[in-house]
Image: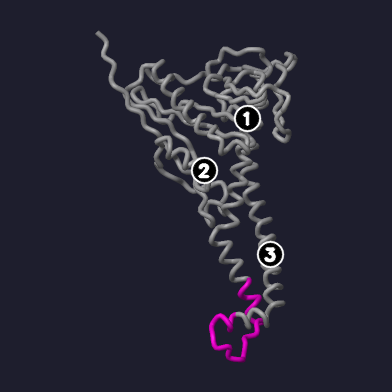
């Protein structure tokens, strides 16, 4: 049985006059409601979670941008530039001790004492230069990641969730099975994490189902709580369920794209049995992909199943 791709209904338009489903609070700048019961549960992509799902996915991109900024600022290229700048500033101004101190430690002590003001001014000069570079690098990464958010919002979430969230919110229920490919974690009645999957139509065949993670993440404060591991576990189980519901061969793959600077997610994937497959430089931004070597890495997990023999 060939992999069935969900067909889009031609001419389908959102009913702008239809009342939208009331949305679960999707504000990410507010603390959780301490008066809400401390329960945690999971749901699929229900209409009332449409806005929250979109906001969380956009926030995951912003978190990647923060990691990228940290990576860029401590990149060897930047450290070398700052060091060279400091040396250029200090070289014509520094005064070396003339008197023989009798020891290396004493000589350096005299050097620091004589050039105390010069060294301090050099550090201030370096701090100003570092601030300028950080601002410049932040703008470089901002242009790249903002385009990713614009693509997400412009597609009304369909690029990630496989369904137009505006259409989803406008309906009180949906029978589209694609909503089951998204798993949302709710704590104190507030969505805090999610993961979404989609069949990879390019790589899937009759014999080999390939699923791709289109988005995964959680609120920043819960990154080290183990919730990402739980989301990956769900993705593995859900992929197996999709395979068992169809007529596929004995192998299946689960793929996920990871930025080269996201060491936390890569460590989680290693623990879950994922392996590195390949990487490509970020092509949308020449500075990120060229000068700083930012890459998108493809990680995957291979499943093997015993052939089912029917009498």
- The C terminus appears in which quarter of the rendering? top left
Above or below, comparing residue 311 to residue 129 in the picture: above
Which residue is depicted at the point 66% across and 12% down?
A: 172
The segment highlighted magenta reads: 86-108
Does the magenta-highlighted stretch encompass residue 88? Answer: yes
**Crowd around label 1: few <14 · some 14–19 · many ≥20 (10 Å):** many
Q: Which residue is mark 3?
A: 127
Image vertical order of residue 224 relative to residue 78, above or below: above
Q: Position of residue 269 (x, y in %)?
A: 45, 38
Which residue in the structure is indicated by mark 1? Answer: 192
Q: Residue at x 70, y 28 (%)?
A: 26
Residue 45 image-quadrant placement: top right
Q: Is residue 134 above or below residue 91?
A: above
Q: Position of residue 58 (x, y in %)?
A: 64, 35
Q: Is residue 2 left or right of residue 102?
A: left
Q: Earlier in the sequence, mark 3 or mark 1?
A: 3
Image quarter of the N terminus: top left
Q: Is residue 71 magenta?
A: no
Give the CA separation, mark 3 to mark 1. 37 Å
Q: Quadrant of residue 108?
A: bottom right
Real-space CA distance between mark 2 and mark 3, rounded to the nearest whole angstrom: 29 Å
Q: Secondary structure at mark 2?
A: helix
In the image, 74: left or right of 247? right
- Which comes sooner in the sequence, label 1 or label 2? 1
The percent coordinates of residue 112 (x first, y second) are 64, 79
């Amino acid at each position: 049985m060939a992999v069935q791709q969900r067909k889009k209904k031609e001419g389908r338009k959102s009913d702008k006059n239809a009342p939208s489903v009331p949305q679960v609070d999707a504000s990410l700048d507010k603390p959780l409601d301490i008066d809400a019961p401390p329960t945690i549960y999971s749901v699929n992509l229900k209409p009332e979670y449409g806005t929250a799902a979109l906001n969380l996915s956009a926030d995951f991109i912003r978190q990647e941008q923060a990691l990228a900024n940290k990576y860029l600022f401590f990149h060897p290229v930047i450290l070398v530039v700052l060091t060279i700048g400091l040396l250029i500033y200090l070289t014509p101004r520094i005064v070396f001790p003339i008197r023989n101190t009798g020891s290396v430690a004493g000589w350096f002590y005299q050097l620091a004492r004589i050039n105390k003001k010069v060294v301090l001014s050099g550090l201030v000069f370096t701090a100003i230069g570092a601030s300028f570079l950080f601002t410049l690098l932040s703008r470089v990464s901002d242009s790249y990641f903002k385009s990713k958010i614009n693509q997400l919002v412009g597609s009304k979430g369909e690029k990630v969730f496989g369904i137009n969230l505006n259409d989803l919110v406008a309906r009180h229920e949906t029978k589209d099975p694609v909503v089951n490919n998204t798993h949302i974690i709710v704590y104190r009645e507030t969505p805090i994490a999610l993961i979404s999957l989609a069949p990879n139509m390019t790589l899937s065949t009759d014999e080999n189902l390939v699923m791709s993670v289109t988005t995964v993440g959680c609120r920043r404060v819960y990154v080290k709580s183990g919730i990402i591991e739980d989301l990956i576990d769900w993705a593995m189980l859900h992929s197996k369920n999709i395979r068992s519901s169809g007529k596929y061969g004995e192998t299946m793959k689960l793929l996920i794209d990871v930025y080269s600077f996201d060491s936390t997610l890569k460590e989680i994937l290693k623990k879950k049995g994922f392996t590195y497959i390949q990487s490509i430089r970020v092509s949308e931004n020449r500075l990120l992909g060229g000068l700083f070597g930012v890459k998108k890495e493809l990680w995957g997990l291979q499943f093997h199943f015993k052939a089912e023999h029917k009498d």
